[in-house]
Each structure stands twice: as structure tokens, then as C-alpha cells.
Image (spheres, rainbow, N blue to C red):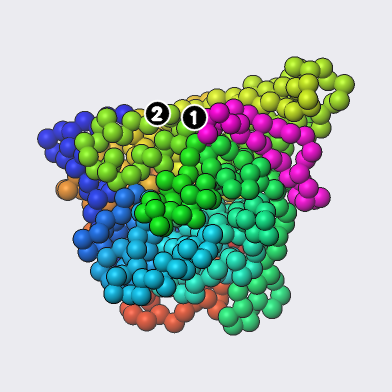
Amino acid sequence: MSIPATASSPSPSSSMEIIFGRNKKEQLEPVSATVTGKIPAWLQGTLLRNGPGMHTVGDSKYNHWFDGLALLHSFSIRDGEVFYRSKYLQSDTYNANIEANKIVVSEFGTMAYPDPCKNIFSKAFSYLSHTIPDFTDNCLINVMKCGDDFYATTETNYIRKINPQTLETLEKVDYRKYVAVNLATSHPHYDEAGNVLNMGTSIVDKGRTKYVIFKIPATAAGTKKKGKSPLKHAEVFCSIPSRSLLSPSYYHSFGVTENYVVFLEQPFKLDILKMATAYVRGVSWASCMSFHREDKTYIHVIDQRTKKLVPTKFYTDPMVVFHHVNAYEEDGCVLFDVIAYEDSSLYQLFYLANLNQNFEENSRMTSVPTLKRFAVPLHVDKNAEVGSNLIKLASTKATALKEKDGHVYCQPEVLYEGLELPRINYAHNGKPYRYVFAAEVQWSPIPTKILKYDVLTKSTLKWGEECCWPAEPVFVPTPDAKDEDNGVILSAIVSTDPRKLPFLLVLDAKTFTELARASVDADMHLDLHGLFIPDADWSAEKQTPAKTQEDENQMPLSPHRPDGTGIGPQ
Ligand SMILES: CC1=C(/C=C/C(C)=C/C=C/C(C)=C/C=O)C(C)(C)CCC1
Ligand SMILES: [Fe+2]
């Protein structure tokens, strides 16, 4: 999708420079937005989002969009008014970089070296002495809700607790203190009670590499006490041995149904030996990841009740999935929907060099992100003949062919091409559902529109505007919603038209018509992920005393919405 460079709007490459090249200034004091249209009275709460905001420090530059220093920003919506604020996560990485006025901590696509005036040998030695070095705590990808606490997250073993109202950075938490993982996703799942289910990878621990599914209880008794972290009661739910000790799969998310977990062991792999020597070789972590098109994608289905793998060996063609959309059970099958690529080109594309040069040809993805539905049979009839399709569902064309060695080869139903950053009405997570809300991406990886895809009718509704670049669309359900799509879509829109301010877009999720927009006279970055915190979610004791008059305005109303609904995290 090429962006027409009209007289008013800057040329595509300078658009990219505006979005991806410049450091964004933080907006520490809440600024009141100019609201046009009408924000629904029931919409009371805070949209809290995370993403890379600083791409250069001093004279040093990050190579990749996923390296940027985490910039948290929030839109507090109250009685039709919107207050915006943003603040850099004050991670150890942020503090070290700012102090040195250069990048001194490595990120995904940038290998960095400690400040020469620091005792470099101890740092280098510490790198060499560990198979896995001490990773960054630049938690730039998402926000996770654990009980009443909120954490900024990336994919390393570190997460940072934050104050969701003031955006202050609080404790640094090391997953390794609670569960043996070196990496963990930024896409945890939540059950109705708010318990967190997440996945991580334990690399060469006691001679084994495995994928670890772990649970963090929302509010275990006693964690209410000061300083007790909900992670204290984290427990390993089950672990899956990696097919390879030294090249485990990279994954960005996973799926859950009411009774199962779906994990794709995909041929986009981390090379552990390369990672262990990356530092001395002066190469980035990203260069230690590679796509093995000669390999397969293994589909693991774990029964949550027995915490055991369903024994059947399911597999599909090599593909790369970052975002699971949803999964559910139907007539003895597990169906799961993912955004799939034919290769790992998406991550290649986000090298800033590709985004800042002449944007057009460099930004060609060699494979378009495609919504695909897979179906796996939970019970394989041993009398079923070899080559027969084990999926007898009327609702999907996905197939699962029984092979002579008992393996089952799955092929998906292709639902829609050209979408990423998928979200759903989370009340339908793990259950049959109908709507996917996502960002439309065609040949460029940069979202140009927001879309609603109706799985039943295969139809779409879209919102787009010249020079507007939408973020991931977050669905917020109407209290006592009857239909799955009763609610609004919230998306932070970045503009590359200097005359147009960035704004929070509020769409009616059913009709996809614009209800309101809240324009903000502040420097806004294109973010990655986040969540909506309904006011009802603020528990009484959480309300830290307001420091300034503005904060007073920020204060949420009574902890419970008039109708008392409190929805789990989005
Ligand atoms: C630092 C670091 C990593 C960082 C990964 C990141 C930052 C991934 C971001 C992915 C995003 C933002 C996807 C969006 O859909 C790895 C590879 C886990 C390896 C260990 C060190
Ligand atoms: Fe993601």
C-alpha cells in the first residue's frame, strides 16, 4: 500500500522519519485534550499503552524499532474529558544510557558496550561467564496486570512495576526469582478472576531447554501485605521440552481455550551458541534468530486439567506467528486463529534503516500477515484411515490429515490477508467468537487503517484517514453488553500532517463510526500494545493521594462505576 505524497502531506520516507526516527518528548504533566464528538458517558477509565519512544541517545542510534527506550503514555477518560500524559520508563537501561549519554545496554537489534570509563572488563567478563548474559529491562512492549499491580513488559526475564496513574517506574522484578525462565512473552492471558497465565523459555537449565507455562495468581492471600509481590505465588503450570537444546523456537504469544493451551513451536529459532558469543562478536540478539524454512511448525496442545500435552503429534507447514488472536473448543476439536507469515520478514522490516530510507521499496514485506484458522482433533480415531481428514466441523474448512505414523498434518483456512496487532472482546477469549479488531497492513508493516473483521460473514468495516497512523485497536465492552461488539474501539492515532495533532480515536465497535476524537497537543509516539483500565478496576487503597491539581482532575471517580461493572484487563 503506497502512501500518496500529496502537497500537504510529507513524502512517505519523511513520514517514516517523523514516526520512527525522532525521539518523542515526554508529557510529564497531564494535558487536557480537545474533544470533538461525544465520548459515551459509561466510558470511564484509563487507556495505558507502551512502545519505543527514544531511538537515539547522544550520538548513538538504535538499529531496530523494537530497541527504542520504553515510553509509557496514558489517556485518562472521565466524564467525556480526556487527559494525556507520557513518561519514559526509568529502567536501569534508561538510567545507564542517559547517564552515559549513549547507548550502553544491548537491545533486540543493537549490541551495545558498557561505558568505556566503566570497568569494561568486569562487564565483558560477566557476559562471557554466563551462557545467557544479563538482559535489558527496557520493558517497551506491553503492560501486564497482576492483581492490583501493573507491570511494563518486554520479552526478557525482567519486568518493571509501574504506577498506572502517574506512570512512575517502581520495582524491577526478575521472573527468574519465581520461575526458571530466561525469556517470557509480553502477551500473557488472564482468566475471569484475573489470574495471569504466561509462557517463557528456560534455556540450558540443568542441561535442558524447555518452554515453561506459568501461572501468577491475581491476589493470593497475604500478598496484600506491603511489598509482597503477586509473583511470589507464581507457579509452573507445565513445561514442554524444546525439540532442540540449543535452538529453541522464538515465540511472541500463545493461545488458550477454556480447557487447553495452544503453543506453536515454530521454525523461527534462537541460536543459543550464537547468543552466548554475540557480545564478543559484536552482533545483535536479532542476528542470532533465524527462520528455518526446511523445518515444520509443531502444534502443542496442553490440557489445563491434567497439565499434560495431548499425545497426538500435530504439525503444519513452516510459518512465523507473532500474534495469536483467539482459540476455542468445538465438538472435540481445538480451533485457533493466528496472524501468520511465510517467513520472518516482519522483524527484518522494522530495522530503522529500512524504515527511514526511501520507504517504498525497502518496506516490501515478502509475506503479508494473514489471519488463518487451524483446527486440531483432540481425539484421533485409531480406525480412521490414513490420509483421511479428521476435522468434521461445518464451521471451518481447516483440515487435519491423519498420517501413517500417527502424526496429524494440519492445514488452515485462510480468513483475511493484511492485518496485524489483533484484539478481540476479551470476555470472549478462549471461547467461540465472531469479531477481530486489528490494524490493516498491506505491503508496508505500518498500520494505515483500523479494521473489524467478522469471521461469520467474512466482511470488514474500516476506519482510516489521510496521514493518520493508527495504533493497535483496543476494544472496551459496554457495561452489560448483550452483543460481542457492543462497545468502543480506542486507538492512539499518530499524524504525519504537521497541521493535524495526534489524537485518541473513539469508534463505535458495532458500526465502526467515529464517536469522538480527543486531540492532544503533545509529542505522541506510535506505540505497540497496552490495556484499558476501567475506573471500576481502581481499588480504593490504590488511589495515591493526588499531588497536583491536575492529578486531582485525574482522580478516578468512585471505585465502582454506577452499574458496578468491573471488566478484567483487555
Ligand atoms: C532483548 C532481547 C529480546 C527482545 C525481543 C523483543 C524486544 C521483541 C519485540 C517484539 C515485538 C515488539 C513484536 C511486536 O509484535 C529477545 C529476542 C527475546 C532475545 C533476548 C534479548
Ligand atoms: Fe505483540
The residue closer to the viewer here, 139 or 354, is 354
Is residue 342 visible to the viewer in this orientation of the structure?
A: yes
Q: Residue at x 29, y 70 (%)?
A: 116
> In the figure, 131 relative to 335: above or below?
below
Give the magenta-colored segment's residue range: 292-320
Beta carbon of the mark 2 residue lies under 8 A of ligand 1 = no
Residue identified by numbered label 1: 342
Secondary structure beneath dot 1 equals loop
> In the picture, which quadrant includes the N terminus?
top left
- Circle 1: is it few (<14), some (14-19), or many (20+) Cα within 10 Å? some
Secondary structure beneath dot 2 equals loop
Quarter of the figure with residue 53: bottom left
Instruction: From the viewer's perspective, tell me whether residue 518 is left or right of residue 535.
Output: left
Q: How much space separates mark 1 and mark 2, taking CA atoms?
A: 8 Å
Tell me where residue 525 appears, x and y as whole percent. Answer: 31, 54
Tell me where residue 434 appears, x and y as whole percent. Answer: 59, 35
The residue closer to the viewer here, 269 or 567, is 269
Q: Residue at x 72, y 57 (%)?
A: 237
Tell me where residue 534 appears, x and y as whole percent. Answer: 51, 61
N-term mark: 1 or 2: 1
Does the segment drawn in magenta span residue 297? Answer: yes
Tell me where residue 25 appears, x and y as whole percent. Answer: 25, 63
Residue identified by numbered label 2: 366
* Contact between labelled residues 2 and 1, with CB atoms less than 8 Å apart: yes
Quarter of the figure with residue 212: bottom right
Is residue 472 visible to the viewer in this orientation of the structure?
A: no
Q: Residue at x 49, y 72 (%)?
A: 172
